[in-house]
Image: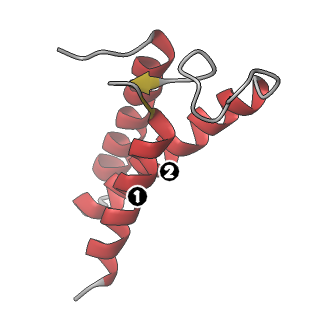
Amino acid sequence: MIRGNGWGIAIAVTGGLLGGMSSYFLRLTDPQALMILGAAWSVLDAMLRALRRHQPHWLVNPQAGGFVWHIPVWVFGLAIFLVSALVTLTP
């Protein structure tokens, strides 16, 4: 069961579409497409949270942006981006 909010699910779907379309149309490898997915998740969630930075603890507050399983979406995006970058850059 996925536990999250509407913003988190919308960000996840949007990032998935961007990653999938970049893989299909630009013929990127899977780690490269996942880097786009992670970057999209992080940027979209950070922009949404920046708009609500007047709230307390806005960077990790579930009501300030997207979250899944009580973890902000930007954390998942950053983790996916970093792991994919390591896979892409290591021989």
Against 6, residue 89 (above or below) is below
* Residue 34, percent from left and from top: 33, 53
Residue at the outermost bottom position: 91
Q: Badges 1 and 2: C-beta atoms under 8 Å apart?
A: yes
Binning the other alpha carbons within 10 Å of mark 1 as few (below 14), some (14 to 19) or many (20 upward) gives many
* Residue 20, percent from left and from top: 31, 41
Where does label 2 land, which residue? Answer: 39
The C terminus lies in which quarter of the figure?
A: bottom left
Upstream in sequence: badge 1 or badge 2 = 2
Compared across the picture, whether 36 is left or right of 49 comes to left
Label 2: which secondary element = helix
Against 29, residue 46 (above or below) is above
Name the one closer to the observer, 69 or 14.
69
The residue depicted at 50 percent of the width and 41 percent of the height is 74
* Residue 72, percent from left and from top: 47, 33
Q: Amino acid at mark 1?
A: Phe
Q: Amino acid at mark 2?
A: Ala
Res 83 → quadrant = bottom left
The residue depicted at 45 percent of the width and 53 percent of the height is 78
Colour scheme in use: secondary structure
* Disc 1 from disc 2: Cα separation: 6 Å
Name the one closer to the observer, 25 or 7.
7
Compared across the picture, whether 44 is left or right of 13 comes to right
Name the one closer to the observer, 15 or 2.
2
Res 35 → quadrant = bottom left
Label 1: which secondary element = helix
Can residue 49 be seen by looking at this rendering? Answer: yes
Where does label 1 land, which residue? Answer: 81
Residue at the outermost right position: 54
